[in-house]
Image (tube, grey):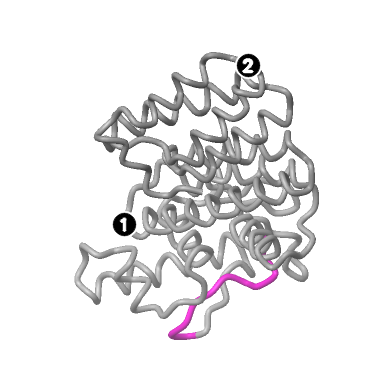
Amino acid sequence: MGTVGYGELKLDLLGSWRLRRDNEILHVATRQQRLIAALAVRGPSMRGYLSGLLWPEYPDARALESLRVSVHLISRQVPCLIVNGGAMLSLDERVDVDVQRIRSRIEALQEDRQTGNAASFVHELRDAELLPGWYEDWVVFAQNRLSEERFQALALLARKSLAAGDSETAAEAAHATLEIEPLYERAVALLVTAELQCGNPGAALRAYERYRDQLGKDMGLVPSGSLTALVADFLDRQSLPVADRLVAAAGSLLGGRPALNPT
């Protein structure tokens, strides 16, 4: 990827904003960063839409003028980054954007196509926070959208890894899923199963008890019977008396109402 005659352009929005040409960092003012980020996240957009998105506090004419100035400055500083189609603006399709790249890998995972090493993909997804520290409404919307996509992909990686017999990667993926949504019971079940298969019963029990306590505290609910039975069955097979305590705990809160997303 890159732009003909001007070297390879790479735009990073995950972790922090960074623009590079042939690995040399290009310094761009904050106002121009916002426009470049909006085009990278939202794709080709009309000028009127972008001006309202980025300068909502300005009258229309002033917002459009601010957009025109930003486009001019970017075109001078970073030739071939923005494609000026008159009323429509976009990034050059040859610019390598990390958000687009990770979304392509998520799509490939969902379509059961090859996505490379599962463990490395888990780490990549775990760290893929979009523009942390940016709080504008359109950014927060994009952050939430990517967070949901990461959540779904990590849960899918946990299931696929467990089915493939890769318990360590399954446990890491389940952990990362729970970092995004701590009360997602299916991920807890995957984590417990993976830790048991890895020979880590203590870690499996801690995961269960952490979830049980948080679920009771936050929502006044208890784990589903299937999750509790998964843990209790293992403890029964180990002849550990703790099994009775776990089963009792499952029915102790609010008459034993189960969690909202049982496996």
Determine the image quadrant of residue 144.
bottom left
Q: Is residue 250 left or right of residue 107?
A: left
Say above or below: 15 vs 237: below
Amino acid type at circle 1 is Asp
What label does residue 137 carry, if any? 1
- Residue shown at 60%/41% (left/top)? 190
Instruction: Looking at the image, tell me whether mark 2 or mark 1 is earlier in sequence order.
Output: 1
Read off the residue under disc 2.
Answer: 239
Badge 1: how crowded within 10 Å, few (<14), some, or many (20+)? few
**103, 6: nearer the viewer:** 103
Amino acid type at circle 2 is Ser
- Residue shown at 51%/76% (left/top)? 44
Badge 2: how crowded within 10 Å, few (<14), some, or many (20+)? few
Residue 1 lies, in percent from the top left, at 76, 65
Q: Is residue 37 left or right of residue 169?
A: left
- Residue shown at 51%/16% (left/top)? 242
